[in-house]
Image (tube, rainbow, N blue to C red):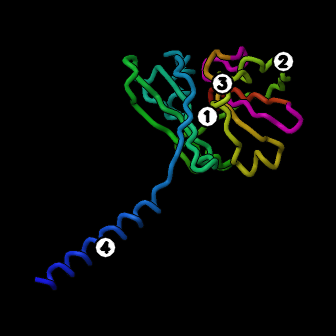
């Protein structure tokens, strides 16, 4: 009987060690989500090209951007959630951030020329209510060009964002650059 008690104790100790090891593997994460907004892509030929090239399902009418952060490090590039009319998730899409991605991938984004904005023009997006929407820029390419923080602006949130939305980057010196998504050229 004494051996049985020792075996039980050893099993309990092994179980506790296993649980402690599992806790070490646990990684706390935060998800930052933009406001849900109407996706302004028409049913025209141009809209169909945009949906095909970007990979947006036909039933998607709402969009939200997300960034996941682990211990203050962003998951590279984040992505988008697409929702149907009833606001049910129809697709999640990660951004890989590679400049050559469109050569080797089925879906890609294209942008208009950047628009430079100053602090005054960005007042609403810089307000305390939007603070959690800004995340540290993690792309080595963009950081090497002066990008410090990034935010997805919803379609129509800024005039220049148009119907498909835009990325806004805080650059060195508190200058902001807005890159609006455009319908891909191919």
At which x and y percent is residue 68?
A: 55, 42
Mark 2: which secondary structure? helix
Residue range of the region highlighted in magenta in the rendering: 158-174
C-alpha span from label 3 to label 1: 35 Å
Local SS, label 3: helix
Name the residue that disc number 4 marks: 13
Q: Is residue 104 above or below residue 111?
A: below
Q: What residue is rendered at 15% in x and 84% in y? A: 2
Q: Which residue is mark 2?
A: 120
Task: Classify 10 Å Cα crowding around label 2: few (below 14), some (14-19), many (20 and above).
Answer: few
Which numbered disc flags the more N-terminal residue, 3 or 1? Answer: 3
The residues bearing labels 3 and 4 have C-alpha atoms spaced at a distance of 48 Å
Is residue 161 shown to the viewer in this render?
A: yes
* Residue found at x 43% / y 34%: 91
The mark that comes first in sequence, 3 or 4, is 4
Q: Nearer the viewer, mark 3 or mark 4?
A: 4
Looking at the picture, tell me which residue is in the foreground, 126 or 169. Answer: 126
Task: Specify whether 75 is left or right of 160.
Answer: left
Q: Is residue 147 above or below residue 38?
A: below
Q: CA distance from mark 4 to mark 1?
A: 62 Å
Q: Quickly name the residue at label 3.
A: 130
Q: Tell which residue pokes out farthest to the right in this image.
A: 173
Q: Considering only vertical position in the picture, is 120 above or below 50?
A: above
Disc 2 versus disc 1: nearer the observer: 2
Q: Give the number of the disc on residue 66.
A: none
Q: Regarding mark 1 in the picture, which secondary structure is present there?
A: loop
């Amino acid at each position: 009987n004494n051996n049985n008690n020792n075996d039980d104790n050893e099993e309990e100790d092994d179980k506790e060690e296993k649980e402690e090891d599992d806790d070490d593997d646990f990684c706390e994460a935060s998800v930052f989500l933009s406001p849900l907004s109407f996706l302004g892509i028409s049913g025209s030929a141009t809209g169909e090209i945009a949906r095909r090239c970007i990979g947006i399902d036909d039933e998607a009418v709402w969009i939200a951007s997300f960034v996941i952060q682990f211990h203050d490090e962003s998951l590279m590039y984040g992505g988008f959630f697409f929702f149907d009319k009833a606001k049910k998730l129809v697709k999640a899409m990660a951004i890989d951030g590679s400049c050559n991605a469109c050569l080797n991938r089925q879906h890609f984004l294209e942008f208009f020329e950047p628009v430079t904005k100053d602090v005054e023009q960005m007042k609403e997006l810089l307000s305390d209510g939007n603070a959690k929407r800004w995340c540290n820029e993690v792309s080595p390419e963009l950081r090497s060009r002066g990008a410090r923080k990034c935010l997805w602006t919803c379609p129509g949130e800024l005039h220049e964002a148009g119907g498909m939305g835009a990325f806004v980057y805080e650059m060195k010196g508190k200058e902001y650059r807005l890159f609006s998504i455009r319908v891909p050229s191919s």
